[in-house]
Amino acid sequence: MTGCPTPEAEAGAVLSIDLGAVADNYRILKERLDRAECAAVVKADGYGLGAAQVAQVLFDAGCRQFFVAHVGEGVRLRQTLDNADIHILNGLLPDAEATYRTHRLIPVLNSLAEIDAWRDNADTRTLPCDLHADTGMLRLGLQPKDVQTLAEQPERLSGLDIRVVLSHLASADDADSPQNSAQLEAFERTRTALPMGRASFANSSGIFLGSDYHFDLARPGVALYGVNPTPDHPNPMRPTIQLKARIAQIRDAQADETVGYGASHTVGGPTRIATLAVGYADGYLRSLSGRGYGYIGDHKIPLVGRVSMDLITFDVTAVPQELCHPGAWVELIGPHRSVDDVATEAGTIGYEILTSLGARYHRVYKNG
Ligand SMILES: *Cc1c(COP(=O)(O)O)cnc(C)c1O
């Protein structure tokens, strides 16, 4: 959750979140899927957009399967969603079994030890769960030898109501990667050994690898929030956020003066510098130092000097003065600047830009 909301009058920047665009993105992905059902991954506070808000609008768009990473995220999401399945990707924590049962959370079981622990909880009931098979991430999930063990000893799964058998793609954003088809074959072998429940394989980018990858249930996250799941092609998704910040101060600088920490930028001649109350503490990544851009109207302005904790500085010399004064707005993410653009300049991915969006922004939800 995003903590104490910041009122607009006190905020250095305003983050607008278009929930209608999130719902549209859900529909765009659903259309791609024909027969498979479309879940939604809303971990990390709905990729920074607000899990409660996005989950409600996705539920209204027809989504009934939700995935989060942590059990605590599931407990909070249950307050928003009474009538949907909530799956916990990080699995079963020892001694937390009662929390899953109380809040009707479905653990994604990642190891034989987790399977044994959940089965020991089943006693007279059958308990819902998913099984995660690792097909090439070397991260979470049952290893091939564990899958083999389960196929040979089916009694280890007795008392468990297995809803979904899933695996996760490592390179789906690169359609040419041979890892995709290798993982697909490994997942098909997994399904032969573990044919129960529904099969789930594709994340956002996996949906665009074609229907072989769709199985019964897709698990998109980032595409719902407008990041391009097909980086080599135009973005099929709608943008969902805009971020604008107010100019706090403007000053005139002369040749050879320097801007900010470490004096990393030296002014070439008469220059106007605008300062905005946004910094790396707001998730405006420090790696954007000397590389980021903003827009004032249609005027592109370069970020100069380092990104500080609470402030950034732009060279606004080329912007007409009537557009550029204390209180004027600068677009940091919006029609001219996509999340993917900012990510490229920061040397990262859209996921990190979204999940870093700060708690000090004033948040406005539209079309909910
Ligand atoms: C985060 C995650 C997803 C969603 O991935 P996107 O690339 O954001 O679509 C799906 N499945 C698992 C196991 C995940 O961890």
Image: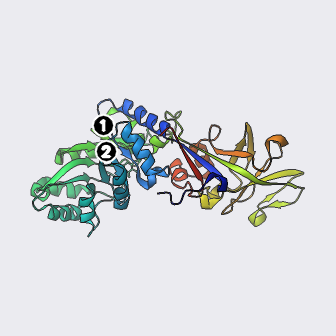
Residue 125 percent coordinates (x, y): 12, 57
Alpha carbon distance from label 1 to label 2? 9 Å
**C-beta proximity under 8 Å, tags 1 and 2:** yes
Q: For the residue marked with disc 2, what is the amino acid?
A: Gln
Q: Residue at x 33, y 38 (%)?
A: 213
Of helix, strand and loop, which one carries label 1?
strand
In depth, the one of 144 and 343 nearer the eye is: 343
Residue 297 percent coordinates (x, y): 73, 38
Earlier in the chain: of badge 1 and badge 2, it is 1
Residue 358 percent coordinates (x, y): 57, 56
Q: For the residue marked with disc 1, what is the amino acid?
A: Glu
In depth, the one of 261 and 355 nearer the eye is: 355
Is 274 positioned to the left or the right of 197 in the image? right
Q: Residue at x 69, y 51 (%)?
A: 291
Is 205 positioned to the left or the right of 328 in the image? left
Q: Residues within 10 Å of mark 2 (few under 14, many from 20)?
A: many
Is 190 positioned to the left or the right of 168 in the image? left
In depth, the one of 269 and 41 nearer the eye is: 41
- Residue linked to disc 2: 65
Picture quadrant of residue 147: bottom left
- Residue linked to disc 1: 37
Q: Is mark 1 within 8 Å of ligand 1?
A: no
Q: Is mark 2 within 8 Å of ligand 1?
A: no
